Amino acid sequence: MHSRTRPAGLLGTLLLLGALLLAAGTPPAAAKAPPGPVAGPGTNHATDDPFTSDRTSWWRQDRFGMFIHFGAYSNLEGEYTRPDGTVCRNAEWIKRECRIPDDAYEKQAATFNPADFDAQAIVKAAKDAGQRYIVITSKHHDGYAMWPTKQNSWNLRDHSSFDPHRDILAELKKASDAAGIKLGFYYSIWDWHDPDFADPATFPRYKKRMYGQLKELVQNYDPALLWFDGEWDADNPTNAWSRRDGADLQAYLHDLNPDLIVNNRVGKREVADGDFGTPEQEIPAEPVDGQLWESCMTLNDHWGFAKYDTHWKSPATVVRNLLDVVSRGGNYLLNVGPDKRGRIPRPSVDRLRETGRWLGSHGQGDAVHGAGHTGLVADPAWGAVSRRGNDLYASVTSWPEAGRPLHLTAKSPFTITSAQVAGSSQKVRVTPAGDGFDLTPSGAATGPLASVIRLAIRPPAAAPAGTGKGLTAQSWANDSFTGPPAVTGVDATVNKSYRFDGSPDPKIPADHFSTRWTGSIEPRFDETYTLSTVSDDTVRVWLDGKPVIDSSTPHGPKVDKGTVTLKAGHRHSLRIDYTEVTGEAHMKLLWSSPSQSQQIVPQRQLYAR
Ligand code: FHN
């Protein structure tokens, strides 16, 4: 066993000494700010609509990912025997929850040797499960980096018994690319090990190292996604991460790679942070407003490996969860925790393989991959309904008794032109019934996990796509629309993330400004639409002269909604009054309807008058 911390040597010691003297002499506050783009008034950090952009398309199509919690904590396999002989159990929080002294934790990490980490086997397990992206912990709260970072020697290359010529993130990247699987990295902002993290006075020095690590990850491994965590207010150690830190980091990362997808824990898990929300160990009861979302979950009760935890979810639970998530417009990130040798536990592999077999049978995967929420029907008690093009997938987890119907409540008139049970030739009788349809199968369920009835539909009529160029936008350099507007123009969409430094125009300061959008909005369906705003600080919306949203008390990033009945192809007059008082600023206008999935209202449906 040879545990390597970076060899000091005389030169190393002198350099280190010099660095320490320099650092000691440099007041922390003067520590050079992390690198990043120069923004300022006139900057809008929202560069696309995550609901529809090419940048997020793979993520919205893939739907199902593998989470991997793997780090120095895995070496303890969920159990720590204290010097007094008492045994303490935890997984990735074991250092803190079992109060392991730093030296003892570092000593055990020095024996960490995941020699059996097999990237190809892991990628195969994901692929066989139908998981189309992978997110692995590059650094969890214990601060231990799973790649040869140059920012410190607390990492798998410099502080372990692992082969120093290997790089598991590079191995996973190579195997993922070869298999057509996207790779993302989890990165904890909260760092229990970095000496500069705990003290707000030295926190800038930690941030500099953090930015350095993230630059290494982005430039050396080209991840498609960064999954931040540990952003919350915490103590032991105090977490000084702020919303502004989140805004700065998003701008920095966008500068490094504009295609990167980032979760909402880059900031403070607000609706305006990152590209998607991250409900954890839970599934939202209905589609989430204002932001994409992904539910992350363990397969047993621990994220990191815990040798005693055999409380595994059944394949039926995994499939049901996956279908519920997708039918509500979300992604499902299901976790595995490799053991200290780097092997995924067999019970995890077995359950994932069962799930993959279900997805790969009879085209059932079409209910998940490339599918999503439909507002055309209500969420049924007997299962879940997802939409993929003009097919609805009724995934039944409670198959009816012989001759009994499954009722489907329609929320807009449409026609079912055919109904076919995946993997069965049985007939399904479709009869209009009450507020929708009765689907009456003529045979048995096709298996224990879920049976899928594919419904080909003729959807509600759509008016032709609009020819709009956007709304008239007037902005004032005050937050009360006082005097003549300082700037007048046309905004293609209302999709603004000014954050802390930006504003509608270089002539408008980052605080105390207001914008009024006027013109008309043209729907494509005769339906009841939900108009949603994501705003900070205030917003009011009128449609056809009537108030729809009034959120005029200054607030942080917030979703407000109003329902309106719109006529396909008709131009409904629209006015939005938005103000930014101080701090960060956001303003987005989205819509959804039974036939329209949630999106930023597109330019072609907005008109200047
Ligand atoms: O504290 C972490 C936890 O260890 C785990 O990584 C989960 C997974 O998302 N996130 C945090 C708890 O919210």
Image (cartoon, rainbow, N blue to C red):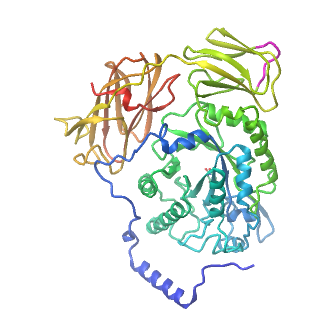
The residue nearer to you, when weighing 96 against 224, is 224
Q: Residue at 83%, 21% (x, y): give it.
A: 444
* Res 332 visible: yes
Q: Residue at 61%, 33% (x, y): give it.
A: 371
Q: Quadrant of residue 458?
A: top right
Magenta stretch: residue 19 in it? no
The residue nearer to you, when weighing 579 against 415, is 415
**Which stretch did the figure color magenta?**
398-404
Where's the C terminus, which quadrant?
Answer: top left
Where's the N terminus, which quadrant?
Answer: bottom right
Name the residue at the front extreme: 178
Residue 13: give x, y in percent of width and height.
53, 87
Magenta stretch: residue 400 in it? yes
Up-down: is 314 above or below 562?
Answer: below
Residue 331: give x, y in percent of width and height.
61, 40
* Res 550 visible: no
Residue 286: give x, y in percent of width and height.
59, 30
Side of 170 where 344 appears, left or right = right
Q: Quadrant of residue 85?
A: bottom right
Name the residue at the bottom extreme: 10
Q: Residue at 30%, 53% (x, y): give it.
A: 40
Up-down: is 206 above or below 586?
Answer: below
